[in-house]
Image (cartoon, rainbow, N blue to C red):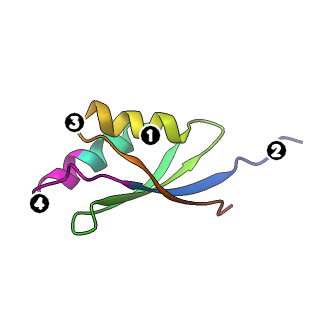
């Protein structure tokens, strides 16, 4: 019987978002990461909440995606919310 994938949710600090168009770029970069199922970007708080399958990707890969898009990010908080 295959094990069910574990969904994790993390919040990234993305201080480089300086205009209202920035979240669009950050969200697009995160959605392209294989295993990411949900992205919510909040411009006012300069953060992004990402839900992903930890069998397919990692926090490092997610932060690298925002960095590659020109918006370096760091882990703000994590929740081991399993779904």
Q: Mark 2 or 1 closer to N-term?
A: 2
Name the residue beneath numbered marker 3.
Answer: 70
Name the residue beneath numbered marker 4.
Answer: 20
Specify the segment rendered in magenta.
13-25
Left or right of 4: which side holds 66? left
Name the one closer to the observer, 62 or 7: 62
Q: Mark 4 or 3 closer to N-term?
A: 4
Left or right of 39: which side holds 36? right
**For numbered disc 3, what is the local secondary structure?**
loop
What residue occupies the far right of the structure in this picture? 1
Residue 60, above or below 77 = above
Label 4 vs label 3, nearer the camera: 3
Left or right of 13: which side holds 22? left
Residue 34 in view here: no
Name the residue beneath numbered marker 2.
Answer: 3
Residue 15, above or below 61 = below
- Quarter assignment of residue 23: bottom left
Which residue shows up at 39% across the image and 33% down it?
64
Name the residue beneath numbered marker 1.
Answer: 62
């Amino acid at each position: 019987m295959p094990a069910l994938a574990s969904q994790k949710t993390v919040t990234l600090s993305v201080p480089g978002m300086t205009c209202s168009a920035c979240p669009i770029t950050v969200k697009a970069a995160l959605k392209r990461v294989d295993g990411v199922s949900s992205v919510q970007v909040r411009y006012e708080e300069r953060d992004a909440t990402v839900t992903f399958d930890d069998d397919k990707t990692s926090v490092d890969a997610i932060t690298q995606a925002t960095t590659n898009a020109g918006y370096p990010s760091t882990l703000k908080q994590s929740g081991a919310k399993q779904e």
